[in-house]
Amino acid sequence: MPPQPWGDYPVAFGGESEVQLQSRMVAALSRIMARPQHDCVLAVSHGSACQEFLEYVTGEGELPDNGAVLHFGYCDGAFSLLCW
């Protein structure tokens, strides 16, 4: 496996690109947060998915440490990083 960023590397092996992963994460979490009575949600994922979501929210793609807890806010259809 090459070092990150992986770009489209996983696609050749049946995986998804970083862009596809990010789109899937954003869509799934947006759907979850838009549901009634979903003001506080715990979502758990692997580092690459967390990194892609963090990049979407902040514009920076720093890889969180293993076991990192990222606290995001969601208001009016937009996510924000509250603390890390």
Image: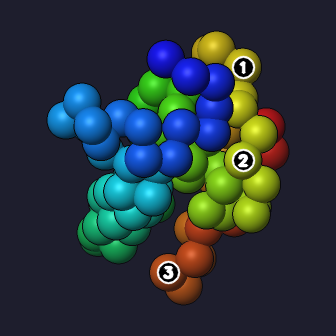
Coordinates of residue 65 in the picture (x, y in percent) = 72, 19
Looking at the rendered structure, the secondary structure element under dot 3 is loop
Left or right, 23 with reference to 36: right
- Front tag of 2 and 3: 2
Q: Using the rendered view, name the quadrant where residue 5 is placed.
A: top right
The answer to whether residue 78 is above or below residue 7 is below
User: Residue at label 1?
Assistant: 65
User: Residue at label 3?
Assistant: 77
The answer to whether residue 76 is above or below residue 34 is below
- Front tag of 1 and 3: 1
Camera sees residue 81: no
Q: Using the rendered view, name the quadrant where residue 67 is placed.
A: top right
Q: Residues within 10 Å of mark 1 (few under 14, many from 20)?
A: few
Which disc, if any, is residue 61? 2
Identified at 54% across, 38% down, the residue is 6
Identified at 42% across, 37% down, the residue is 9
Looking at the rendered structure, the kind of residue marked 3 is Gly
Task: Give the CA separation, mark 2 to mark 1.
Answer: 12 Å
Q: Does label 2 or label 3 sit earlier along the sequence?
A: 2
Which disc, if any, is residue 17? none
Q: Using the rendered view, name the quadrant where residue 51 is placed.
A: top right
Looking at the rendered structure, the kind of residue marked 1 is Asp
Mark 3 and mark 1 in contact (Cβ < 8 Å)?
Answer: no
